[in-house]
Image (cartoon, helix red, strand yellow):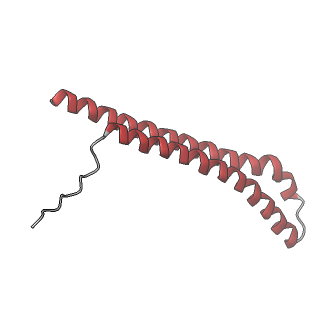
């Protein structure tokens, strides 16, 4: 019994570690992508800003580009979390408590 429990616990912790690692890698990738978007696409434009209106316009462009990256991030992180939750359901099949039965009088 102890070996079976130990094996389940090892599967459970591996599942948590794998999901956390995947989310961490995704976070790092997204932050790098957003930084690269700003550096690649808007750095030269930042150097030529003269008026406050130009600063606001550039900030809106950067926000729109970052928003696209954010939407992609939300979808990918949702997929990871969904796989994580489904994996937990498979690892812990009897985790849902049974409803107490009503006693008749």
Residue drawn at the location 62% of the way across and 42% of the way down: 29
In percent of width and height, residue 75 lies at 60, 48
Position of the N terminus, as image quadrant, is top left
Q: Residue farthest to the front?
A: 105
Q: Residue farthest to the bottom?
A: 52
Q: Nearer the viewer, residue 25 or 100?
A: 100
In percent of width and height, residue 96 lies at 29, 50
Residue drawn at the location 66% of the way across and 52% of the way down: 71
Say which quarter of the image contains residue 9: top left
Q: Nearer the viewer, residue 76 or 92?
A: 92
In percent of width and height, residue 67 lies at 70, 56
Task: Classify 82 as above or below 15.
Answer: below
Task: Classify 50 as above or below 86.
Answer: below
Q: Is residue 72 left or right of residue 51?
A: left
Q: Nearer the viewer, residue 47 or 30?
A: 30
Position of the C terminus, as image quadrant, is bottom left
Q: Is residue 19 left or right of residue 73?
A: left
Q: Is residue 26 left or right of residue 47?
A: left
Residue drawn at the location 69% of the way across and 45% of the way down: 33
Say which quarter of the image contains residue 93: top left
Q: Nearer the viewer, residue 18 or 89?
A: 89
Task: Classify 2 as above or below 33.
Answer: above
Residue drawn at the location 12% of the way across and 64% of the way down: 104
């Amino acid at each position: 019994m102890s070996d079976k429990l130990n094996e389940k616990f090892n599967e459970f912790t591996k599942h948590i570690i794998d999901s956390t690692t995947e989310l961490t890698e995704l976070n790092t990738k997204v932050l790098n992508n957003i930084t690269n978007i700003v550096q690649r696409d808007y750095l030269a434009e930042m150097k030529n800003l003269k008026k406050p209106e130009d600063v606001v316009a550039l900030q809106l462009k950067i926000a729109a580009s970052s928003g696209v990256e954010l939407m992609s991030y939300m979808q990918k992180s949702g997929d990871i979390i969904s796989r994580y939750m489904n994996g937990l359901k498979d690892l812990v099949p009897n985790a849902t408590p049974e409803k107490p039965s009503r006693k008749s009088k």
